[in-house]
Amino acid sequence: MTFQGFNKEDFNTFSIEGLDERMEAIQTKIQPKFQEIGAELVDYLSAHLGNEVYLHIAKHARRTVNPPNDTWLAIADNKRGYKKHPHFQVGLFDDHVFIWLALIYELDHKKEIANKFVESFDQLKQLPDHYVVSLDHMKKASIPLPELELKHVERFRDVKKAEFLVGLHLTPDDQRVTNGDAFINTVKDTYQTLIPFYQKALQARS
């Protein structure tokens, strides 16, 4: 089976009441698609980065009451986990898909990595105008790339819980979301654009 795209039912998962019921839908509808997408992206990134990377699919294991509002796959160069490392993400909220290079608050060497991104602010601003930035992976809100300011990157450096995610948001009815091949190609193109910033993050942590 190859990835056929995301459909309305996938996004409707996040309106299902109850933790167990929503988790069952995530596990049966969305996670098999993440496996298919992830297998292709791991091969792609390993080839383009020149080192092995590993697929992680969010388990939402800490949740005991509230069902998740989003779900995702992550790809990192660490086999055991991804949250402490620069990583790539693909995931869904109820109203959009996100495709990220993600630097979240658990990140090791966060200050060094953030400093590198502050220094690279001009290069960040040269990313495509339709890209967006998130300062909190738990929230839907994003900043369009043209509105990104240096203070946002400095906040990532200076505030312990601050995060920095850069990439794309796509709506559920976008043809790049509903067509499997188009989606995979869009993710690859996005990651290709973001790989230089991923590599800056790796250099800063070493």
Image (spheres, rainbow, N blue to C red):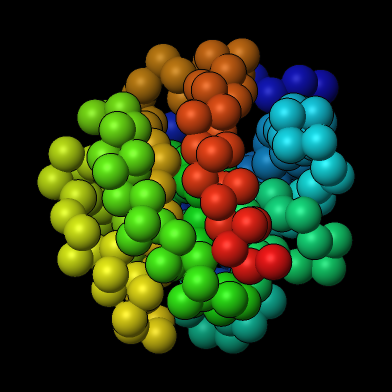
In depth, the one of 135 and 94 nearer the eye is 135
Please state if 157 lies on the left or on the right of 109 as rendered: left
Q: Is residue 115 among what the camera can see?
A: yes
- The relative height of residue 180 versus residue 69 in the rendered view (above or below) is above
Image quadrant in which the N terminus is located: top right
Residue 134: x and y in percent read 33, 56
Residue furthest front in the image? 119
In depth, the one of 159 and 96 nearer the eye is 159
> What residue is at 52 percent from the left and 84 percent from the top?
65
In depth, the one of 162 and 204 nearer the eye is 204
> What residue is at 61 percent from the left and 47 percent from the top?
199
Residue 21: x and y in percent read 59, 64
Please state if 42 lies on the left or on the right of 142 as rendered: right
Image quadrant in which the C terminus is located: bottom right
Please state if 100 lies on the left or on the right of 38 as rendered: left
> What residue is at 85 percent from the left and 44 percent from the top?
52
> What residue is at 19 percent from the left and 66 percent from the top?
151
How many callouts does the rendering have? 0
Residue 191: x and y in percent read 55, 33
Location of residue 59 (image quadrant): bottom right
Residue 120: x and y in percent read 37, 50
Q: Is residue 23 among what the camera can see?
A: no
Please state if 154 lies on the left or on the right of 105 as rendered: left
In depth, the one of 32 and 110 nearer the eye is 110
